[in-house]
Image (cartoon, rainbow, N blue to C red):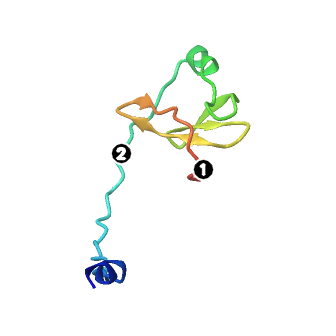
Amino acid sequence: MTAELLRESHVITPPPIPVPLIPVPPIPVPPIEWDADLLRRLACPACRGALGIEDARLVCTACRQSYSFAGGIPRLIAARSEA
């Protein structure tokens, strides 16, 4: 009898509790002044294309992937199919 109860045990899963999303305002980024030689040395981690600066972000001229800055440092991390 105990073995039957274990095989037919019913697990009641409570419904998920909704968590409100709190909007986070974007951090203002000061205008970036890059040395042209340094910018030529950087490449897109996704496709190795040239990078340019658009709207305070580095943007690949080939695949159009964009990269943000954190504390003035570019975050050149290729996205894993999140786009």
Residue 5, relative to residue 83: is it above or below?
Answer: below
11 left or right, relative to 43: left
Determine crowd level at label 1: few under 14, some 14-19, many 20+ residues with C-alpha closer than 10 A: few
Residue 12 in sight in this render: no
Report helix, strand or loop for mark 2: loop
Residue 39, relative to residue 82: is it above or below?
Answer: above
* First along the sequence among labels 1 and 2: 2
Residue 43 in sight in this render: yes
For badge 1, the amino acid type reads: Ser
**At x 70% / y 33%, what residue is drawn?**
47
Residue most toward the right?
62
Q: Alpha carbon of mark 1 to alpha carbon of mark 2: how far? A: 27 Å
46 left or right, relative to 20: right
Provide the residue designation for mark 1: 81
Q: In which quarter of the view is residue 16 placed?
A: bottom left
Q: Which mark is residue 42?
A: none
**At x 28% / y 72%, what residue is drawn?**
20
Report helix, strand or loop for mark 1: loop
Q: Position of residue 21 (x, y in %)?
A: 31, 68
Q: Nearer the viewer, residue 52 or 80?
A: 80
Provide the residue designation for mark 2: 28
Residue 32, relative to residue 10: is it above or below?
Answer: above
Q: Position of residue 50 (x, y in %)?
A: 68, 28
3 left or right, relative to 66: left
Q: Position of residue 14 (x, y in %)?
A: 27, 81
- The mark lying in front, picked from 1 and 2, is 1
Residue 54, relative to residue 20: is it above or below?
Answer: above
For badge 2, the amino acid type reads: Pro
